[in-house]
Structures are given as structure tokens and as C-alpha cells.
Image (cartoon, rainbow, N blue to C red):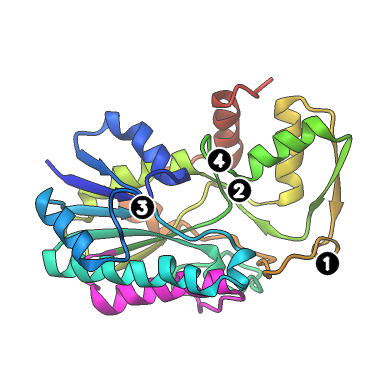
Amino acid sequence: MLNILVTGSNGQVGSEIRELSKDYSYTFFFTDRTNIDITSKDDIKSFCEKNSINVIINCAAYTAVDRAETDIENADLVNRKAVKKLAIISEELDIKLIHISTDYVFDGKSFKPYYEEYQTNPQGIYGKSKLDGENEMININPKNSIIIRTSWVYSYYGNNFVKTMLRLGKEKESLGVIFDQVGTPTYAKDLAKTILDIIPKIQNSKLSIYNYSNEGAISWYDFAKEIMKMAKLNCKINPIETFQYPTPAKRPHFSLLNKAKIKKEFNIEIPYWKDGLDDCLKRLGERK
């Protein structure tokens, strides 16, 4: 029996893990900032020792990409310093640490899907802070570190692109959505299931970085079009270029992730992006 600590359990991936947890024979401890301070080594160590934790799934993250450009200290606190503390304790107590990272560690200038070993080059504070967190894990605890990079996360829970499109699709007759940024949505439920499924297989593994998103390749425009189609909303989606929707943080123009490694090593199948969207909209009561 494994005892699993899930940090940031009120976020999208953490919430999906909580919902799926009943299907797994692990003992789960779901925490957030109210009952464990992941910026405190003593707090983490005490909790892990008291509950005999074997695996930490770190879902806690500072994900406000634009705000991070000016809120540098807090982005660094959650995405690097807290990860460093988790890495120190996981090394001291011989605990597996699974950490969720991002496609923003890459610069988005490639024209081929990024594989794990590709040169990182974050273009903003958010991506830099996430890469810094990865490097802390690698330097402190290579024996027990598993890093999963993902992209365009949405779910039944929290605020995300799908929910925003549903809301605006009911309020407006038309919307402009960016068509020159290409990637793949990740349904948090699919990512959560994959994490829980691979846990027994990582017990003897050393440092590994994996990519995970749903299958397929689309733009935000294509994604929005399909949301409206599935939900049967009459809002017209118009394609616009990135420069027409300026944001404080620079977004990757191309962030497709090569997922061959995680599929081969763990013998998993990854759902197509439309299948994930279909399931999410049904759960939200929006699939028409």
C-alpha cells in the first residue's frame, strides 16, 4: 500500500486526481496551502514522516502566466523555491516526487514536436520559474524525480479556456481567437489518470522527464470552434493573429509535445483531444 501526498489538490489536476482516487488502492492525502506549507521544509518533512508518505504528486503551481511578468517573487516562490523544498525532503526521506511542469520551458520556435531532451529556452517569467523548479529537482534529488511537462490544461474544475469559451459563447455573437499558436489541449482528467496508472512502475526508476498532452495538433481557434460546435452555441469564431491580442507574457507559437517516451515506457494509450473535450463538456452539462 502506497501513501500518496497530493499538493495543490484544489487545482485542476489535483481535483481530477481526487475524483479518480476512489478507483485506486492507494492511501491519499490531499493538501493545499491551508494544511501544509510547501515553502517550509519542516512542514513538509513533519507531514511526510507522520503519514509515512511514499510518493508526492506536486500539483501546486503559480500559473498566472501574464501576472508572473510583474509578480516575479511569488512565481519563484511557488514554482522554484517550494519545489526545491519538496526535492530536499523527498531526497532525505527517499520519497518519489512527481512534478507537473509545462511546455513554456521551450521557446515555441520549433517546427517539430518537442521531445524531452530538446534545448529549453523559456520566453517569460512563468516558463523560467517552472524550468528553475525542474532544475532544483534534478540537482537535489535525481534518484527520485519524475517531471511531466504538459500543455493547454483544462478540466471540469477551476478556470480554464473551455469554461471561458462556453461563457463568452453564450454572451457574444462573435469572438476573435488566435489561430497562429499551435499545440494540443490536455484534459486534466486524462493526465491525472496517467499519473496514477504509472505510479507502480516508477518505484525503481531514476530521474526521468516525460511529455504529456492529449493526441492531435490544433490552434486555439480550432479548439474554440470545436467547443462551440459540441456545445451547439451560435457564437461565430473568427481567426486572429497573436499581435492582434497582445499580452504581457509571450506565448509559444508552437508547443506540440512528442509523447513517444511516456507511451513506450509505460505502455499507455493517450486519448485524442476531441474525446477529452467531449467528456469534459458532458460533465459540465454542456454537450448538446
- Whether residues under marks 2 and 3 lie with C-beta atoms below 8 angstroms apart, the answer is no
Residue 123 position within the rendered picture, expressed as x and y whole percent measured from the top left: 61, 76
In the displayed structure, 203 sits above or below 137; it is above
Q: Residues within 10 Å of mark 2 (few under 14, many from 20)?
A: few
Q: Where is mark 4, residue-wise? A: 272
First along the sequence among labels 4 and 1: 1
Q: Indicate the quadrant where residue 131 lies.
A: bottom left
Does the magenta segment cover residue 124?
A: yes
Amino acid bearing label 1 = Phe
Question: Which mark is in front, 2 or 1?
Answer: 1
Instruction: Give the spatial CA distance, label 4 vs label 1.
Output: 30 Å
Q: Indicate the quadrant where residue 3 lies.
A: top left
Kindly identify which numbered label has been placed on residue 216.
Answer: 2
Q: Residue at x 34, y 47 (%)?
A: 195
Question: Which mark is in front, 1 or 3?
Answer: 3
First along the sequence among labels 1 and 3: 3
Q: Secondary structure at mark 1?
A: helix
Side of 198 relative to 236 (left or right): left
Q: Closest to the observer: 66 or 169?
A: 66
Q: Which residues are magenta?
A: 118-145
Give the number of marks: 4
Amino acid bearing label 2 = Gly
Amino acid bearing label 4 = Tyr
Q: Where is mark 1, residue-wise? A: 243
Q: Where is mark 3, residue-wise? A: 33
Q: Indicate the quadrant where residue 78 lies.
A: bottom left
- Whether residues under marks 2 and 4 lie with C-beta atoms below 8 angstroms apart, the answer is yes
